[in-house]
Image: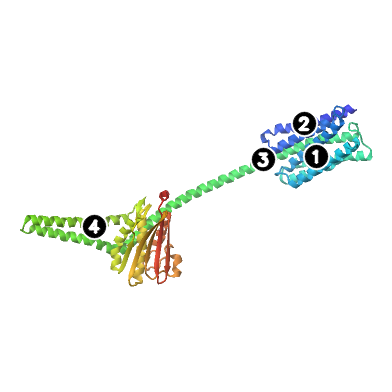
Amino acid sequence: MNIDVQTIFWMDAFLYLVLHAAIWYGMSRYRSGLVTLWSVSGIFSALGVWVLGCRGLLPTDVVVFWGVLFMALGNFGRQAALRSLNGPADRRWLWGMGSFYGVYLLATYGFYFSGGSEAGVILLFYGFYTLNCLEYVVSGRRIGVTHDPFGSRAVQLAGWLLVGSLGIKTLALLGGWGAVDLYEMSWDQAVVFGGQFVAVTMLSVGFMQIFVDQIHKGQIQAEQGLAREQERSALLLQHSEDLSVLLSEREEIIRQLTLSNKSAGMGALVASIAHELNQPLTTIVLKTELIESHLQRNRDPQAALAEAHKLADLIREDTRQAAAIIRTLRSMFATGKGEYARIDLAQKVRDVVNIARTHATRCGIEININLNEPLLLTGDATQLQQVVLNLLNNAIDALVEKPVQPSRISISGQVRPDWIDLRVADNGCGIDDAQKQDVFALFKTSKSKGMGVGLWLSQSIVASHGGHLSFESEPGQGTVFLLSLPTRDYVLAS
């Protein structure tokens, strides 16, 4: 009879080994730390059952020590794997269950090696695992909340089957109805081994079902996340394209507004420009008449020729002056898109002032320029001249609407590390506090004939150059506009 029960032990060990080896092989596609833990735990349980079936082949002390230890390690490993299906097992549970196993092992070894009977060791073994296998029932219920119900029910049923079969064996031992010897064949041994065969199989099937369900859920979540990311990417791409269109439209609007603002600003300068061009043209006509007069006189031909050459030189100088004025105007009122280049802003400011000075003088306004050093930067000369022209026009308009004596506009420049500053200041009546927040607002102006575009457009142009335009004003103390622009070449990238 003994050999038959030992054979059953070895068959049980073989069942543990085959089931967990099948899991290891079958789950190779999804192999992870949990699969490894479950499979290795099954191997420990197989070793434990095999050692417990080797009494007579191995010393009894070896059978008790290693058999009990391997069974504890295998069972604890499977329980930890089930607890880790939703993430790392809780530390409190690990410490609590580990302490439970530790107390059991110490009690078993202390009892046996202090002279306790084999029957007492068997009773401790079955009593401990009757309570311990309730953990499978608890784990199955926890898993059922978030995982496949079939797998969780399989784990729960396996737990109840283990608790029931082991509990019957424990009660039989306590009541004296069952086999006291480890290898004695009796009804309670059959209940235990039958429960072990079925329960271990159900536990393995339940674990695989739960683990595969978890993998599938993870894949679905990954696919959904990928779909969401693709959707976000498509939306971002669409938004990027829309933004590119809007930026292109913004550039075109700024270009059109620049042209409109130039046309509006030019009206205020028409008289001055006409006067500036009229002077050299008038002198050209007069000097031409003088040449004809000298040549018509019957006097020394050499003296007449020398006088004609002298007048011709003066005509050439006047013509160059008129051509310079025209070139400046063509640059300031160009209709093409701006191009960035390395420029001296100080010289561009002087060109603008030369155009506006006569108009300012006729209005009784003095313009003082304090630009003693080059203001070198990378930018669009036409756009930046338009900004300066807007600031000059605004200052002139402010002094014309509310004159002060003497009326002055001062322009000065300063070079800082990586920056240049240009200040345009007037000594007019300043800006009311109620109007300060609308100074750079589009289509808002305090001037009766203004468009409300100039300062908004100027600020946009300065921002596109990587700079900023600000102002300071106190009622009755005048207004100062500060134009700050970077000098580094990275502006070309804009």
Give the CA distance from mark 4 to mark 1. Answer: 106 Å
**In this view, which residue lies farthest toward the right?**
176
Amino acid under label 4?
A: Gln
Q: Earlier in the sequence, mark 2 or mark 4?
A: 2
Crowding around mark 1 (Cα neighbors within 10 Å: few <14, some 14 to 19, many 20+) is many
Residue 407, relative to residue 7: is it above or below? below
Give the CA distance from mark 2 to mark 1. Answer: 18 Å
Q: How many marks?
A: 4
Residue indicated by mark 2: 17
In the image shown, does 120 or 15 lie closer to the viewer? 120
Query: Does the CB distance between marks 2 and 1 fall below 8 Å?
Result: no
- Give the secondary structure at mark 4: helix
Residue indicated by mark 1: 158
Q: Taking 167 as reference, is 29 left or right?
A: left
Give the CA distance from mark 3 to mark 1. Answer: 24 Å
Residue indicated by mark 3: 216
Q: Earlier in the sequence, mark 3 or mark 1?
A: 1
- Give the secondary structure at mark 2: helix
User: Where is residue 353 drawn, in percent x and y?
Assistant: 31, 61
Crowding around mark 4 (Cα neighbors within 10 Å: few <14, some 14 to 19, many 20+) is some
Closer to viewer: mark 4 or mark 3: 4
Q: Earlier in the sequence, mark 4 or mark 1?
A: 1
Residue indicated by mark 4: 321
Query: Does the CB distance between marks 4 and 1 fall below 8 Å?
Result: no
